[in-house]
Amino acid sequence: MFAVFPGCTLEKYSDDLKKPLVKVLECLGIEWIDLGGRCCGMPLLLSGDVDGFKEVVKRNIDYFKNVSVIVTSCAGCFRVFKEYYSGYVVKHLSQFILDLGISSFPRSVNLKAIYHDPCELIHCGVFEEPRELLRRIPGLNLSEFRLNRESSTCCGGGGLVKAVFPSLAVEVAYEKILRELPQDVDSIVSSCPFCYLNFKDASSIYNL
């Protein structure tokens, strides 16, 4: 049995993303353990509190007894688990769904979307799985930012910037949209909830 780690962003700031996550897992018809209500420790690490981060990791490992596979939809949590939690198979949700062998989805959409590479998945070399998953959605026309994959630019919200300098984070997202987004795109899609929130805030504040 695998365990799902939603991450702080989904649980505290984006309930509209956690509900679909749960629905997707339920539709897959497989048993899973919910590791919700916990933090991977990344904010402490980014703020320089290494001792606090190590304590969170220790508590989580004690809590994760009998768990061998951790699945998360948060790019930041994914990177932290891959680099600082030993003894686990760690998968991003996009990787996990592809590994199940799902070739297509039953519901069609009429959407032209563009994919944004989250910084944390870039550092882990995860580029194709989210794109491949999107390509399997009937009716979804996927395009790319001019700068993508290893060359992709940050949404502005990573590295605690959105927490410490929220206006700057939104401004960076807005500038990326103005500079790189084709006019005929309906939606920006990302495999990071933090990127989603920052682009959403930029779209709302600047009436995009």
Image (cartoon, rainbow, N blue to C red):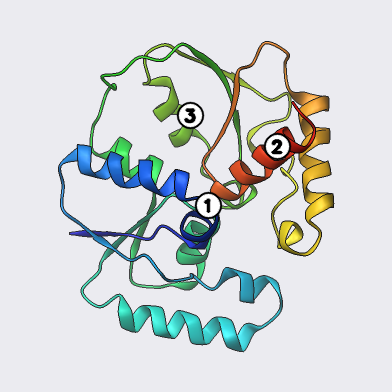
Q: For numbered disc 1, what is the local secondary structure?
A: helix
* Residue 75 x, y percent position in the rendering: 53, 52
| Mark-to-mark CA distance, 3 and 2 | 14 Å
Disc 1/disc 2 C-alpha distance (Å):
15 Å
* Quadrant position of residue 13: bottom right
Give the residue drawn at x 46%, y 80%: 57
- Residue 205, image x, y percentages: 77, 38
In the rendered structure, the answer to whether residue 72 lies left or right of residue 161 reads left
Q: Secondary structure at mark 2?
A: loop
Decide: few, some or many residues near mark 1? Use Cα within 10 Å; few <14, some 14-19, many ≥20.
Answer: many
In front of the other: 47 or 121 = 47
- Which mark lies nearer to you, 1 or 2? 1
Gap between marks 1 and 3 measured at Cα = 15 Å
Q: Are marks 3 and 2 in contact (CB under 8 Å)?
A: no
Dot 1 or dot 3, earlier in sequence: 1
Question: Which part of the image, by quadrant, shows the N terminus?
Answer: bottom left
Please tell me how crowded label 2 is: few (under 14), some (14-19), or many (20+) other residues with Cα within 10 Å.
some
| Residue 59 placement (x, y as % from top left) | 41, 84
Q: Amino acid at mark 1?
A: Ala
The answer to which quarter of the image holds residue 159 is bottom right
- Disc 2 designates what residue? 152
- Label ID, residue 75: 1
